[in-house]
Image: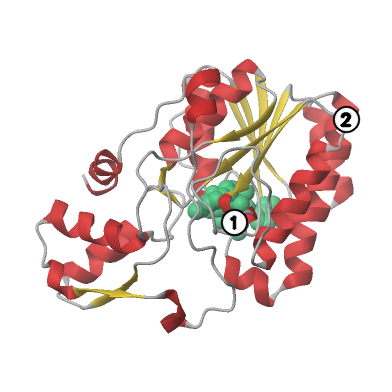
Amino acid sequence: MKVLVTGSNGLLGSFLVNELTNYGHHVIATGKGSSRLQTNTAPGILVYRELDITDAIWVEEVICSTRPEVIIHAAALTQADYCETNMAECWDVNVTATRFIIEAARKVSAFLIYVSTDFIFDGKNGPYIETDPPAPVNYYGCSKMVAEKSVMESGLSWSIARTVLVYGNSPSVARSNIITWAAEKLQKGERIRVVSEQHRTPTFTGDLAKGIRMIAEKKAPGIFHLSGKDFMTPYDMAIATAEYLQLDKNLIEKVDAAVFSQPATRPLKTGFIIDKARKVLGYEPISFSEGLNQVLK
Ligand SMILES: NC(=O)c1ccc[n+]([C@@H]2O[C@H](COP(=O)([O-])OP(=O)(O)OC[C@H]3O[C@@H](n4cnc5c(N)ncnc54)[C@H](OP(=O)(O)O)[C@@H]3O)[C@@H](O)[C@H]2O)c1
């Protein structure tokens, strides 16, 4: 199967490229600027094309010249605080560019998989199932919800893969995550303050990439919640990290998110119920403690 991935220099994108090529799929990896992918893929199975998705002509040229059977749209502006303070740019990348991809996908009759987020929910009643009503509490969540709606109304064959707090290590992505951040600080003996009133089902990137590959192979239509299976707070995650590395848990202070005065409000209790993905796709994520082992080994 020929699959085009947007945002392939990102955390999820880099895992997706490896997952798809490992399963013998031909991948057109696209990203803003030159490739930062690090793979040992056999030549012929992977090509990289530079693509800024906010340029409609460029999007059409890359998609129409490569004619993928499936498009996985993972590129986005993903930092909620940045989106809150740069709304026009957030709209361009997350909403308008998604519409460019829909238009181009229509021209080649591709199956479109849109990657979305738990931040489309207000966090009052998590964990959520696929049919729960969206009600975002910040601009990033709003942009992703509007893009989802464009996908649903596109007339294409589509799937939406929503996920939650993604963690993992990729040689292509320098960004830290809660596990590596907590580990680094605690190893230096530094005190850390970690939010204890938000609940999530943190997702190992490898699991998410696998779930999306399963959607692509089955061309499974509709919305899928793909996350980890453990319902935890960031504080729980930091404690689990300290326990795994046998570091001093007393350095971890429980706080409410309000102490950080971030521009974007965070939904309180999200997380996903993943029964549909288990049943339809055979999706089965690893536990958070296994995820710790993957990230810290
Ligand atoms: N990370 C999470 O916790 C999380 C949770 C829920 C949902 N998601 C969703 O999962 C998807 C993947 O996120 P991620 O964690 O892999 O984020 P990421 O590492 O920030 O990757 C996003 C990628 O999008 C690219 N991008 C941004 N603007 C672009 C443009 N104009 N043209 C082309 N590419 C552009 C970025 O390029 P540069 O690297 O060059 O900037 C980056 O590589 C997103 O749709 C996100 O909304 C993520």
The reply to whether the residue tagged 1 has its Cβ within 8 angstroms of ligand 1 is yes
**44 sits left or right of 187 in the view:** right
Quarter of image, res 2:
top right
Which amino acid, mark 2?
Gly
Instruction: Please tell me the numbered disc located at residue 119.
Output: 1
Rendering coords of residue 264 (x, y %): 59, 73
Q: Which residue is mark 2?
A: 155
Give the class, few, some or many, for how many residues have Cα within 10 Å of label 2's Cα (few <14, many ≥20). Answer: few
Residue 53 visible in the picture: no
Q: Residue at x 54, y 67 (%)?
A: 266
Quarter of image, res 162:
top right
Q: Tell me the mark number nearer the camera, choosing from 2 and 1.
A: 1
Rendering coords of residue 180 (x, y %): 30, 59
Mark 2 → mark 1, Cα distance in angstroms: 25 Å
Which SS class for mark 1?
A: helix
The correct choice, above or below, for 247 with respect to 253 in the image is above
Residue 193 visible in the picture: yes
Rendering coords of residue 101 (x, y %): 81, 41
Q: Residue at x 68, y 57 (%)?
A: 135
